[in-house]
Amino acid sequence: MNQEEMESQYVAEVLDTCLKAGRLMIQGGSEMYRVEDTMRRIAFNAGVKGARCFTTPTGIFMSLGPHSYTQLTQIKDRNINLELVDRVNSLSRDFAAKKITLNELQKKLQALSESTPNFPIWLQIFGATILSCTLMVLFMNDYDWIDFPAAALVGGVGYGVYLAIKKYTNIRFLAELVTAIFMGVLTIGLCKIFPKLLVDNILIGALMTLVPGVAFTNALRDLFGGDILSGIVRGTEALFTAIALGGGIGIAIKLLWGIL
Amino acid sequence: MPYWVEIIINFAFAWISAVGFALIINVPHRALVLCGFSGTAGWMVYWWGIQLGLGRLGSNLLGALLIGILGGVFARIKKCPVTVFNIPGIVPLVPGVPAYQAVRALVDGQLSDAEDLLLRVAIVTIAIAMGFLLAQLVVEVFFKIRRNRKNKKNFV
């Protein structure tokens, strides 16, 4: 009896660890096959054979073969945070190499989910700034240096606004919509002050900080790789992000271009 | 502008933009520089592909293929997941311009133009995804062959 109890506790611990690792990886935007692989590998290295899991971008189910246990976990927010994926990956490697015990792994995953290591905010905004001006030049392919500082400004400030809104609201797609409106208004204002600037060039550069092109590509890759469900979910999410952005820009241009 | 200046600008700006995106999506510190080179390689292949007349689909496919292969190699060097290098790498290839123009056309009420542009976005995205798939195949086959060879040597 006592032995059985201990075993059931151990199995519950294994399940909890696997689910935590899977949840963190999906939140960080990993591919599905890698998530399943990592979860199964943790279970295998913990000495449980025949683990099965079913992963979707909104929740994970896992059962451990010979033990009649099944657990599930929900995933509410998904974005791209590759540091998270990398950390979970290296923790799983350490566990496989017997450098850390199951208990330590569980504690480290818990710590990771409570405080994700991030680049400081000024560095993220700096990234958005250099991204929007350089991509504008690459995309337009006509090397106009007049729009260069304007694209940098709109991209950087717009991304700062995006981060600020995201801090205060949990509603999906709202931050994207408001940021797009803000970027549109700012760009049109700049173009009215300096008439030599081009609205389209500046906005193409600035919006690239938020455009879900990467999410679309990831979704298609999931689809082609056979993860139909997660591909559809991620694709739909990317589509709605795109609609929010496009709608915001449309609102800004339609309303302001005539008035100002 | 002389051609070599254009090459330098494209090379440097692709690196900067990939690193900029890497900062936004919180790439591990040790992978930042190589992420930039992934982006540069993909963009240069795309740029030269367009100039050679391979068309949008072909150039994007080749660019994504190279990014995927480099990602697989870098991932083994730095012991990171492949996505860490692939996601920042494709940022210069993402069809941002036609997507934006499609929205502009929709706002202006030119629906047939918007349809054309949206289709172009879809084709480019599919080309990139297919490039990645092929790259995965290439990397897996390459490393499998190499491992088999090593095993054979040990055996003999």
Image: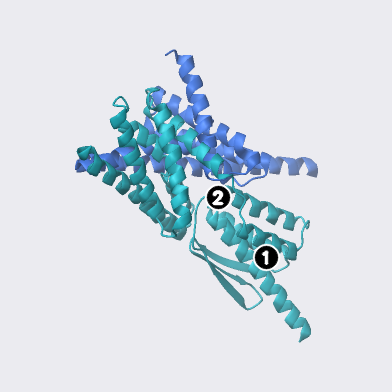
Chain colours: A cyan, B blue
The crowding category of the residue bearing disc 2, from other C-alpha atoms within 10 Å (few below 14, some 14 to 19, many at least 20), is many
One can see residue B15 in this view: yes
| Image mark for residue B79 | none
Q: Which one is closest to the eye, mark 2 or mark 1? A: 2
- In this view, the residue in front, B152 or A62, is A62
User: What residue appears at the point 72 percent right and 62 percent down from the top-left corner?
Assistant: A45
Instruction: Identify the image quadrant of the C terminus of chain A.
Output: top left
Q: Disc 2 is attached to a residue of which chain? A: A
Give the residue type that dot 1 points to. Ala
Task: Please give left or right for residue A84 compared with residue A241 in the image.
Answer: right
Give the residue type that dot 2 points to. Asn
Q: Is residue A188 above or below residue A225?
A: above
- Quarter occupied by residue A63: bottom right
- In this view, the residue in front, A210 or B105, is A210
The crowding category of the residue bearing disc 1, from other C-alpha atoms within 10 Å (few below 14, some 14 to 19, many at least 20), is many
The CA span between labels 2 and 1 is: 24 Å
Q: Is residue A114 above or below residue B120?
A: below
User: What residue appears at the point 32 percent right and 41 percent down from the top-left corner?
Assistant: A185
Question: Which residue is label 1 attached to?
Answer: A43
Q: Mark 2: which secondary structure?
A: loop
| Image mark for residue A81 | 2
Q: Earlier in the sequence, mark 2 or mark 1?
A: 1
Task: Please give left or right for residue B27 compared with residue A178 in the image.
Answer: right
Q: Where is residue B83 in the image (x, y as percent from the top left)?
A: 56, 46
User: What residue appears at the point 73 percent right and 58 percent down from the top-left corner?
Assistant: A95
One can see residue B142 in this view: no
- Quarter occupied by residue A190: top left
Q: Mark 1: which secondary structure?
A: helix
